[in-house]
Structures are given as structure tokens and as C-alpha cells.
């Protein structure tokens, strides 16, 4: 039995995988940074009108850059600030205050269980609309991937909120001496929640970038 090898097929597949993983890492980093800063301003620190506005601005910048990463990776994108792309970014921004409002109105732990699916649904719609904005092919598999990506991001967000609401522990490292300076690192539960959220965001973006880059 003979095996016919097509030159370049494996290398093209490898390049697509590398591009997808790199783009997913970039998008997940943007999500973690934007949502993390917003979460710190709104949930961890004392909430004021100015911090709420600042948090929304951070979310919008992160969402716009996230949309730009998706467009630059999957299509020939020439303009970032178009009405449709801004609209998709605003939907992602609106998802987070809505999620937190639902969770706070119901209260924990029930609020966590109800708000999670709400966030998953809105993010799934946003991801699906993002594909349409960049005129990518649509299929049943695309819709399933959007739902799965939304669910993964919501799972990470629920874990993050639970780490701030349901846990109250702090770990202090041993004092480290740097000459005349003593440094002590303080690790709190919600900081580990950021890492968990980032991991879920990476998995969510990896699946949708992998699908978008398939020939």
C-alpha cells in the first residue's frame, strides 16, 4: 500500500494552528485584562459613578481590540471603527454589567447560578454576530461553537465572582529581603479567579479561532 503525501499540507495546517493559538492567547489576554480591571473597579473596590464609567471605558477598549484581533486573524480587515464592529463590541460591553446586575439583584449563591447562563447567552450571540460582521461562513457547527465559547467564558466569570463573594482568605508569602527592603507578596482568592477566568477565555477563543481558520 502506498501513501501519497501532498507537499505543504502539514505545514499549512501547522501554521493555521499556530496562528489560531496565538490569536486565542491575544484575545484571552485582552478579555482577562479588560474584565479584570472592570471587575476590580466595580466589585473588589468601592463602587462610585466615576469608577463605573471608567470600567465601562476599559471594557469598550478591550472589546474593540478583541474584535480587531478576530478580524485581523480571519479576514482582510482594513478599518476597525465601523458601525457594525462598534455595535458588536458594545454588545460585549453590555453583557458584563447585565451579568453583575442579575447576580446582585438575586444574591448569592442563587444569583451566580442564574447570571451565568444570562452571560453565556449574550456572549454567544455576540460571538455569532461577530462572525457575520466579518462575513464568515455560517453553519450549525458555528452556532454550536458560539454557544460553547459563551458557556466557557461564563463559567470563568462565575468562578471569578464566586472567588470574590464566597471566599475570604489571603495568603502572605514569607518576607523577602532585598538589601534594606523587605517585600511581602499578598495573594487573595479573587486574584486566582482572574487566572481561572483567563484559562476559560483562552479555551473559548481557541475553539472559535480554530473553526474560523479552517479552510
Image (cartoon, helix red, strand yellow):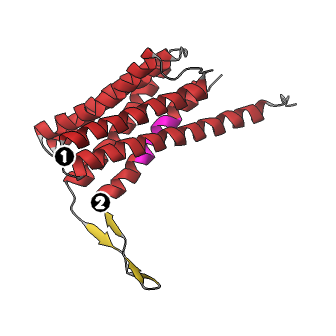
Q: CA distance from mark 1 to mark 2?
A: 19 Å
Q: Is residue 194 visible?
A: yes
Residue at point 47% right, 85% down? Answer: 179
Secondary structure under tag 1 reads loop
Q: Quadrant of residue 74?
A: top right
Q: Give percent across and percent down for residue 174.
A: 37, 80
Give the residue at mark 2: 189
Q: How many marks?
A: 2
User: In the shown orientation, is residue 38 left or right of residue 48?
Assistant: right
x and y percentages locating residue 9 in the rendered image: 77, 30
Location of the N terminus (image quadrant): top right
Q: Nearer the viewer, residue 6 or 37?
A: 37
Q: Nearer the viewer, residue 185 or 171?
A: 185
Q: Which residues are magenta?
A: 198-206
Can you say whether 178 is above or below 47 in the image? below
Q: Residue furthest left?
A: 106
The verdict on residue 66 being magenta is: no
Residue furthest right as drawn? 2
The local crowd at label 2, few if under 14, some if 14 to 19, many if 20 or more residues have their Cα within 10 Å, is some
Residue 25 numbered tag: none
Mark 1 sits on what residue? 47
Q: Residue at x 29, y 49 (%)?
A: 40
Amino acid at each position: 500500500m502506498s501513501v501519497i503525501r501532498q507537499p505543504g499540507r502539514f505545514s499549512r495546517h501547522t501554521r493555521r494552528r499556530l496562528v489560531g493559538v496565538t490569536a486565542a492567547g491575544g484575545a484571552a489576554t485582552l478579555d482577562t485584562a479588560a474584565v479584570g480591571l472592570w471587575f476590580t473597579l466595580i466589585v473588589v473596590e468601592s463602587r462610585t459613578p466615576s469608577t463605573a464609567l471608567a470600567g465601562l471605558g476599559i471594557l469598550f477598549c478591550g472589546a474593540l481590540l478583541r474584535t480587531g484581533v478576530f478580524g485581523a486573524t480571519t479576514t482582510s480587515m482594513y478599518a476597525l471603527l465601523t458601525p457594525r464592529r462598534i455595535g458588536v463590541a458594545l454588545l460585549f460591553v453590555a453583557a458584563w454589567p447585565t451579568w453583575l446586575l442579575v447576580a446582585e439583584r438575586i444574591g448569592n449563591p442563587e444569583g451566580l447560578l442564574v447570571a451565568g447562563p444570562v452571560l453565556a447567552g449574550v456572549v454567544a450571540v455576540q460571538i455569532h454576530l461577530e462572525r457575520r460582521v466579518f462575513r464568515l461562513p455560517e453553519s450549525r457547527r458555528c452556532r454550536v461553537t458560539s454557544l460553547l465559547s459563551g458557556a466557557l467564558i461564563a463559567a470563568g466569570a462565575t468562578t471569578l465572582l464566586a472567588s470574590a463573594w464566597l471566599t475570604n482568605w489571603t495568603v502572605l508569602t514569607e518576607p523577602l529581603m532585598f538589601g534594606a527592603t523587605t517585600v511581602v507578596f499578598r495573594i487573595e482568592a479573587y486574584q486566582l479567579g482572574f487566572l481561572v477566568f483567563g484559562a476559560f477565555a483562552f479555551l473559548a477563543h481557541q475553539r472559535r479561532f480554530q473553526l474560523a481558520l479552517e479552510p
